[in-house]
Image (spheres, helix red, strand yellow):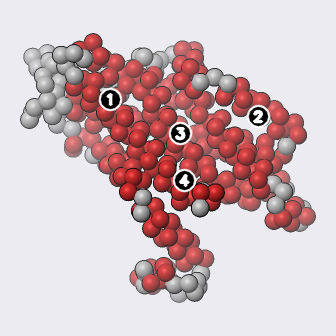
Amino acid sequence: MSRTSDINKAPGWLRNPDVQSSFQAKAQQFYYRWLFFSSNPLAVTGLAIIVLLLLVAIFAPQIATHDPIAQDLTHTLLPPSGEHWFGTDQVGRDVFSRVVFGSRITLYIVFLVTITVTPIGLIVGVAAGYLGGWYDRILMRVTDIFLAFPGVVLALAFVAVLGPSLENAVIALALTNWPPIARLARAETLSVRNSDYIAAVELLGTSSIRIMVKHIMPMCVSSVIIRATFNMAAIILTAAGLGFLGLGAQPPSPEWGSMTSAGRQYLLDSWWLVTMPGSAIVIVGLAFNLLGDGLRDVLDPHSH
């Protein structure tokens, strides 16, 4: 039975209890998880906002109504209007266009940090949990050192040493966001390390690396994905904080945190300078939290 013919028979094929192939089993698992996920309106709302953010970032040149860095000193601090939907800033730049292009910087930071810290945390946690002994002590003590400091404070310290820039902000965020994932992966590994199936593959003479990669890491992936999704919200807030303090993306880059910082001195008379980028930070951060809640309900076996 081909995949094309199988898919053409959906949803009956997806609901059929008589499973004919591994592909059908995986498709059914995904289908039922999607049904469970879609029954949570808050999670769907979070996913929709994130998809919208992705589309805005991809099509930013087409969506933006003005050049995000072009200054026009004859149109400074204009309130929201038909020409400037979110108003203009202190040097006449269109705030709406800057918020739109700022979505690219936000997603760049979030996804670059996430794809960096997730594998590192997973590898460290699984190695510590499975190998135990001195490996566990050394790896976890290093993890504890990073966890002993608040993430924002540690990120500030790293950026202060490395210098203010977008790339250094990404490095600082990566250095401060892998320890929680490592702790989680270690806990998941400890729960399966003494399982019968692990003992069976050990009796077959399977190497420790293969056991960790093929048999333990897949068991940790669901929990790590959930944690990484929640981390994205924290990364957005921390990156905005660094930008607010002038340690992230540098002007004239339309980064939401730096936009908020630049507009605070005009807050009383030109509220839109802070409200628009600040609202974007809050909405996107909330969306990742809502998505994380939905994924936890679907992927975490302990929640069922």
Mark before the other along the chain sequence, 2 or 4: 2
Q: Is residue 122 above or below residue 212?
A: above
Give percent across and percent down for residue 205: 89, 62
Which label lies toward us, 4 or 3?
4
Mark before the other along the chain sequence, 1 or 2: 2
Q: Residues within 10 Å of mark 2 (few under 14, many from 20)?
A: many
Q: Secondary structure at mark 3?
A: helix
Q: CA distance from mark 1 to mark 2?
A: 37 Å
Type of amino acid at the residue the image marks with label 1: Gly
Task: Name the residue beneath numbered marker 2.
Answer: 140
Q: Residue 132, located in which quarter of the rendered image?
A: top right
Q: Residue furthest top?
A: 265
Q: Residues within 10 Å of mark 3 (few under 14, many from 20)?
A: many
Task: Name the residue beneath numbered marker 1.
Answer: 278
Task: Name the residue beneath numbered marker 4.
Answer: 296
Q: Are marks 4 and 3 in contact (CB under 8 Å)?
A: no
